[in-house]
Image (spheres, rainbow, N blue to C red):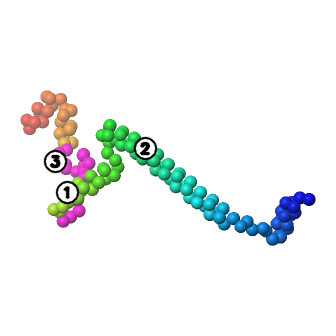
Amino acid sequence: MDWGATKDMGKMLGGEEEKDPDAAKKEEERQEALRQQEEERKAKYARMEAERESVRQGIRDKYGIKKKEEKEAEAAAAMEQASEGSLTRPKKAVPTGCGDEEEEESIVDTVMKFIPTPLMDMFSKK
């Protein structure tokens, strides 16, 4: 007679399950194995990222590129240094071609460049 089949039938019909005395121990071992695998995976990816960063740094050194954080730190230091003696906030940089009309040529000067020399002499004599 096959007692294994009748035990399974009892479980399926809602009967009492047999408790495995080592079930808690096995579950604990399984959880520990999962934690260990997770730690190994994290260590592996940390190693890979460190290798990538060393390659990136080699490229930065070769081509003279600065890291984003370094650029931001230098910009912040420059802004702080420029505004040390000032009581107001630092001025924003003005792009070339904007502002200062004194430096820009007037429209009359630009037009005068395109007028032939004999006509310019007539205008300048007046």
Q: Which residue is mark 2?
A: 51
Say what secondary structure mark 2 lies in. Answer: helix
Query: Is residue 19 located in the magenta-colored stretch of the structure?
Result: no
Q: Which residue is mark 1?
A: 82
Q: CA distance from mark 1 to mark 2?
A: 38 Å
38 is higher (above) or lower (below) than 22: above
Choose top left, top right, bottom left or bottom right for residue 89.
bottom left
- Mark 1 crowdedness (10 Å alpha carbons): few <14, some 14-19, many ≥20: few
Q: Which residue is mark 3?
A: 102
Inspect the image, locate mark 1, and give the three-letter code of the amino acid beneath it: Ala
Residue at the spot 19% in from the left edge and 57% down from the top edge: 82
| Nearer the camera: disc 1 or disc 2 | 2
Residue at the spot 8% in from the left edge and 35% down from the top edge: 125
Write the start and end of the magenta stretch as one range: 87-104
Q: For residue 38, which numbered disc appears in the image? A: none
Q: Main secondary structure of the magenta part?
A: loop
Query: Is residue 90 located in the magenta-colored stretch of the structure?
Result: yes
**Is residue 49 found left or right of 115 in the rendered image?**
right
